[in-house]
Image (cartoon, rainbow, N blue to C red):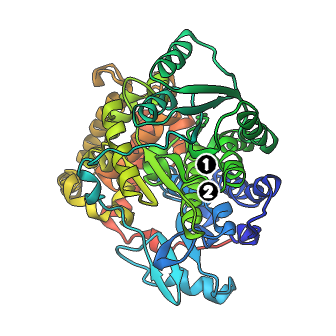
């Protein structure tokens, strides 16, 4: 998909132009994805490759304005890879010297195809580079001394009245900040928020609370003017935490929900970038799914929005300004995952949580060392790879395969290969029933093999979990529609056996699939 390469590239790009670029980028990609999924056989659409230009800080290249505007495609694409591996081709970021013509694109897409294929690439000066997730060893040491904050400057926290905002506001004040501006769309609405502001005041801070939607530039400018009128000093630091989470699987994600989640992250961070361009501290709080796409299953819009703030931090640094993208995994005790009762669900896919104290320790270390981008999360890679088996083949995570260990799939496949037709049916039926029961949280004996599994309470997220675990166990990808159309265990077993026959008895038909770039 080449449309987003036309995104504007001027520092004076307006918020309306930023939004328009999303229509030609993530919204167009979403339409393409959903169109493919509506086919009776989605794989007839070929594999989907998403092409951008200047979005990745690879090979020392600067992230351009145009690159920032295209960057949400990387968050969206990383989730697409996990939700619909049958459609996934990859992501390619071109440099500014490479023409986006058919010959060049074809050469990039066919380079090194085969075992261990890269699905995320950046073309720089004729070289293909690929990302790797690595541990930030330098951030394992405590911040010594802890960061201090300018008592003569104002620190603006968007989403500052939320759980994370108030935790970070307290840390700023204890680190020397004396002027805070906390913004939110609704102002102070709860006793807990009021008490937190009173505590900040008791600690010696002057706190200005402003009602503003940061996705509207005029309202961001109004906050700046209010601070001056109230006699607060110029803004020394911006901490952008405002965000909206309203997830949906890609198959059911509507453009309106994509825009709603993008608004505070995409338009909001762009407005802050332009209105407070000279801030000496510019911290953009991002989120784990923008980098680790599999954990963004069901929230591709959130991953896309956070990929924008990651790219913006790199762009600001390349232009000589302040900029850090700090991508947090879930906190416990406070935060969105707690409010949405999501911690247990995340734990089942290998994503743990951190305490607010741990998150603040990372905050201190990040400010002390000033990296352009870092993601902090507690991950059990064996759980991540078990829940999202295709992530094992995304070489972005190659450095963590050793931590995951063996999935046990080889033994199960050996049993199937050695069994006759009747024995193979028994093995698959038993395994499928056990996996379904585990996803539903019920006793396998309670599952009627002839009953439609949707009548057992299986929803879209559970279906994806079941499909991923079957992929990990048996090496087959069952189309989501098979789970959602009301198939029974017996019917699913027959379909799995047909797929399994291709894996065990015949050539990999996937190699014959055409790869199409639109």
The percent coordinates of residue 218 (x first, y second) are 82, 41
Q: Residue 153 vs residue 277: left or right? A: left
Whether residue 243 is visible here, answered yes or no, is: yes
Q: Nearer the viewer, residue 370 or 227?
A: 227
Point out residue 220 in the picture as x, y percentages from the top left corner. 74, 41
- Judging from the image, what secondary structure is the residue with disc 2 in? helix
Question: On the rendered image, what quadrant is the N terminus found in?
Answer: bottom right
Q: Is residue 514 visible?
A: no
Q: Position of residue 295 (x, y in %)?
A: 43, 45
Task: Check disc 2 and report the residue beneath it.
Answer: 72
Up the image or down, 146 lies above or below 210; here it is below
Residue 109 placement, left or right of 414: right
SS at badge 1: helix
Q: Residue at x 33, y 59 (%)?
A: 392
Spatial distance from mark 1 to mark 2, Cα to Cα?
A: 6 Å
Q: Position of residue 344 (x, y in %)?
A: 36, 27
Residue placed most toward the observer, 372 or 380:
372
Q: Quadrant of residue 157?
A: top right
**Can you say whether 518 is above or below 189 in the image?**
below
For residue 492, which numbered disc appears in the image?
none
**Residue 362 sits in quarter:** top left
Q: Is residue 202 left or right of residue 358?
A: right
Give the quarter of the image for residue 313.
bottom right
For the residues bearing labels 1 and 2, Cβ distance under 8 angstroms: yes
Read off the residue under disc 1.
Answer: 305
Left or right: where 367 falls relative to 75: left
Q: Residue shown at 55%/9% (left/top)?
A: 191
Q: Residues within 10 Å of mark 1 (few under 14, many from 20)?
A: many
Work out which quarter of the rendered image holds the C terminus and state it: bottom right
Of all residues, the one furthest to the top in this rendering is 191
* Precedes in sequence: disc 1 or disc 2: 2
């Amino acid at each position: 998909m080449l449309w987003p390469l036309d995104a504007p590239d001027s520092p004076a790009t307006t918020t309306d132009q930023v939004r328009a670029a999303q229509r030609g980028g993530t919204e167009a990609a979403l339409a393409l994805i959903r169109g493919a999924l509506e086919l009776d056989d989605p794989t007839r659409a070929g594999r989907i490759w998403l092409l951008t230009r200047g979005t990745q800080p690879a090979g020392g290249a600067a992230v351009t304005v145009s690159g920032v505007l295209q960057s949400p495609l990387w968050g969206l694409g990383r989730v697409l890879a996990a939700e619909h591996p049958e459609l996934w081709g990859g992501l390619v970021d071109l440099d500014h010297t490479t023409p986006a013509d058919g010959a060049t694109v074809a050469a990039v897409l066919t380079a090194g195809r085969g075992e261990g294929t890269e699905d995320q690439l950046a073309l720089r000066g004729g070289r293909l580079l690929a990302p790797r997730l690595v541990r930030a060893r330098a951030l394992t040491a405590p911040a010594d001394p802890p960061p201090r904050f300018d008592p003569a400057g104002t620190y603006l926290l968007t989403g500052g009245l939320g759980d994370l905002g108030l935790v970070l506001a307290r840390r700023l004040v204890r680190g020397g900040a004396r002027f805070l501006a906390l913004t939110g769309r609704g102002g102070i609405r709860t006793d807990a928020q009021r008490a937190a502001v009173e505590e900040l005041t008791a600690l010696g801070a002057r706190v200005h609370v402003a009602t503003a939607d940061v996705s509207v530039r005029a309202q961001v400018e109004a906050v700046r003017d209010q601070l001056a009128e109230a006699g607060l000093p110029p803004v020394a630091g911006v901490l952008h935490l405002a965000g909206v989470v309203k997830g949906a699987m890609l198959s059911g994600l509507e453009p309106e929900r994509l825009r709603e989640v993008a608004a505070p992250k995409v338009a909001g961070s762009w407005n802050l970038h332009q209105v407070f361009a000279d801030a000496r501290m510019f911290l953009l709080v991002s989120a784990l799914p923008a980098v680790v796409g599999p954990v963004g299953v069901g929230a591709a819009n959130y991953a896309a929005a956070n990929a924008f703030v990651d790219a913006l931090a790199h762009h600001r640094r390349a232009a000589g300004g302040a900029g850090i993208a700090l991508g947090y995994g879930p906190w416990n005790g406070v935060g969105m995952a707690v409010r949405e009762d999501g911690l247990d669900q995340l734990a089942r896919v290998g994503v743990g949580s951190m305490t607010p104290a741990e998150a603040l320790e990372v905050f201190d270390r990040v400010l002390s060392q000033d990296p352009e981008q870092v993601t902090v999360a507690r991950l059990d890679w064996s759980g991540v790879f078990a829940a999202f088996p295709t992530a094992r083949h995304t070489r972005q995570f190659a450095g963590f395969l050793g931590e995951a260990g063996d999935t046990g799939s080889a033994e199960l496949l050996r049993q199937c290969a050695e069994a006759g037709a009747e024995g193979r049916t028994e093995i698959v039926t038993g395994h499928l029933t056990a996996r379904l029961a585990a996803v539903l949280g019920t006793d396998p004996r309670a599952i009627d093999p002839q009953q439609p599994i949707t009548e057992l309470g299986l929803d879209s997220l559970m279906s994806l979990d079941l499909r991923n675990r079957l992929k990990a166990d048996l090496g087959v990808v069952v189309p989501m529609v098979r789970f959602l159309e009301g198939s029974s265990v017996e019917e699913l077993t027959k379909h799995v056996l047909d797929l399994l026959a291709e894996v065990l008895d015949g050539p990999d038909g996937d190699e014959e699939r055409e790869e199409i770039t639109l």
